[in-house]
Amino acid sequence: MDIKNPDMIPEAAKKAISCNGTHACRGKPEEMCPPESMVANNLLFVSNKKYPHCPYYVPFGYGGCCNFPVRKDIYKLYGI
């Protein structure tokens, strides 16, 4: 899989229907919210300062979680 084409993750791409149009997680690692950690191979904690209105960002405590399926798969595959 080529990170420049994350839509090649077919199942995740099909679920990514709520993006507000920025598509920051689609092939530009420098634009992604920086990951902090992943729990249970499903809950991705991130630092989100660039996209506070992202529909996939869920504030949690002092940080938040990313629920964007493509972003979670990129983290699982590449660790970024």
Image (cartoon, helix red, strand yellow):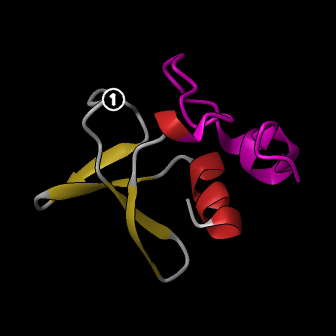
Residue 72 vs residue 34, the one in the foreground: 34
Q: Quadrant of the N terminus?
A: bottom right
Q: Is residue 23 magenta?
A: yes
Residue lying furthest top:
21
Residue that appears at 64% across and 68% down: 76
Residue labelled with disc 1? 51
Rendered location of residue 41, percent (x, y): 55, 78
Identity of the amino acid at label 1?
Tyr
Residue density around tag 1, few if under 14, some if 14–19, many if 20 or more, within 10 Å:
some
Which residue: 73% across, 50% down? 12
What secondary structure prevails in the magenta region? loop
x and y, in percent, of residue 2 in the image: 85, 47
**Left or right: 4, with 38 as reference point:** right
Residue stretch rendered in magenta on the structure: 1-29
Picture coordinates of residue 19 (x, y %)? Answer: 54, 27
- Outermost residue on the bottom side: it is 40
Q: Is residue 1 above or below residue 54?
A: below
The image quadrant of residue 72 is bottom right
Residue toward you, 32 or 39:
32
Residue most toward the front?
30
Q: Position of residue 39 (x, y in %)?
A: 43, 79
Left or right: residue 70 versus residue 80 is right
In this picture, is 78 found above or below 41? above
Pick whichever, 43 or 32, lies toward us: 32
Name the residue rendered at 43%, 41% in the picture.
56
Q: Secondary structure at mark 1?
A: loop
Point out the image quarter for the C terminus.
bottom right
Which of 79 and 9 lies nearest the eye of the viewer?
Answer: 79
Give the number of marks. 1
